[in-house]
Amino acid sequence: MEENKVKIRGIKRGKTREAGSQADNREVKTTMATEKFSTYSGLPEEEKPKYKSLNEEGDFVERSSVEDPEVAHRLAHLENEAFGVLETSVSQRDISNTEIIERLGDKKLPYNERNRLQEMLFESADLARLKGNAIDSELAEVLKKSYTRLRYSKILREKVIEGISVGDTDAIGEILKDDKMAADFRLLGKLTNDEERGKAFAVCKERLDSSCSIIDKVEDIDQALAMYSEALKLVDPKSYSDTYVIESTGKQLANKLFDADATRRIVELVNTEIFSLPQCKDFLHRFGSEPEVIMELIINAKKVEDVYYALKFVTNPELLTQLAEDTTRLTSLTDEQRGSVAGYSKEIADAIAKEPEIITLSGFKEDKDPEFGDAKEPQNKFVVGIHRGQYVIAWSNMEESEYHRNIFEKIGFGLDVKSGGYIGIGESEGKKQIRMVRSSSDYGCYSRELLEHYRAAIEKSLKEVLGDEPFELVIKISSDYDNS
């Protein structure tokens, strides 16, 4: 390839440049613009968010266009390195794009073969773009029909990721801004400190999945929270993808704060709507010894389902009764929902005051040696719930009841406030040890404080199952996988 003759277009950039020369300042419209629409105002409303207007004459470029000529030039050289490889790969094929498209129409096509053929289309699209040609509309349409968005080929992605310099925050930010380029961990790894991460974030923050990927790597929690607050402003509330991405990152930040014992700060962030109650679900059960914290979080809940989830970890009857008698602080809920919460709170408060019913469905099995690791694997499960105003605890070995839901089915009760965990049977310092650990994938975490409240009743029932042999009952925090 004669480098000085190849006209290269940057990765979704708004500039045309000669390879090997300084990027010029000529703005070019996107493929859609040159083929169908002459001005920004002429774009369909649903397409406008993808582009930005350049001037009063109506010229426009894709929103991710590079405006700094030096950055654009660095990226052009990386693309140029991929050009020859792409050209060779496409020219040596024994199948045309038309044939590829026809084969992709086969719904029974094996997964690996489908991926291979799609990659060929990505290569064709990249080569066309780098030559300055329009992308075949049929190619883009067939990918759309197969629920695959057009992205850069592996050849181009690898060249760009491998070639980008460590700490080149402007170029890395531009690449991360491009929705055809994934936020590859190798690319993120070229941002070596929080200062560099902050600079790249400033460039790509409008692309939420990339900006959140950077936030996840930021070590300083204050900086991460500042960036997260900025990213929140860019969320499209109607977008499921935006909501999922921002909530996942918020969840990670909340967990970092929890691990740092910053409980009050978590509450403050929920109060100011930076965080939400669902983002605290990973550790909400760990606040059981601080029920007033859970109640503060409940007050700011946006959904009644989140309130129900949080209430099962409140074991203070006084706090539950107060909420049952006054739900006016739940301002995000409807009158009907507040009434339901009042009834739910009273149900839990009344049940806690009574002795539990404990049901044994089968004998216990000893811990099993694991296939990997050293920790013994529990072979029994238990569930917790409320039935007719009384807490019920039921257990069974996993041979008789494989899933937590199987235990509930065998009980036959219409239980509420459901949760579950595992029971491990082993020895510690020559003495039998019973461990209540982990959590149910069906119903979520249990409340350790609730089980501690009923410790005497649980120990009495265990003696009936185990006989006269002395044992120690250890009740661990739910989701604690240290089964030793």
Image (spheres, helix red, strand yellow):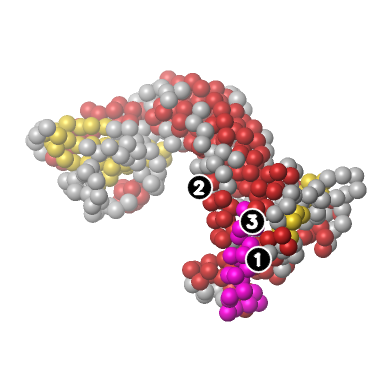
Q: Nearer the viewer, residue 14 or 159?
A: 159
Gap in angstroms between the C-alphas marked 1 and 3:
13 Å
**Left or right of 60, for residue 111:** left
The x and y percentages for residue 365 are 18, 47
Mark 2 or 1 closer to N-term? 1
In magenta segment, residue 85:
yes
Q: Amino acid at mark 2?
A: Arg
Q: Nearer the viewer, mark 1 or mark 3?
A: 1
Q: Secondary structure at mark 2?
A: helix
- Kindly tell me whether residue 13 is visible in this rendering: yes
Return the residue at label 2: 186
Are discs 1 and 3 less than 8 Å apart at CB?
no
Gap in angstroms between the C-alphas marked 2 and 3:
18 Å
Q: Nearer the viewer, residue 345 or 71?
A: 71
Q: Quadrant of the N terminus?
A: bottom right
Return the residue at label 3: 79
Q: Nearer the viewer, mark 2 or mark 3?
A: 3
**Left or right of 484, for residue 236:** right
Main structural element of the magenta stretch: helix, strand or loop? helix
Q: Which mark is residue 1?
A: 1
- Kindly tell me whether residue 102 is visible in this rendering: no
Q: Tell me if mark 3 has few (under 14), some (14-19) or many (20+) residues whose alpha carbon lies within 10 angstroms of its own.
A: many
Rendered residue at 57%/34% (across/down): 196
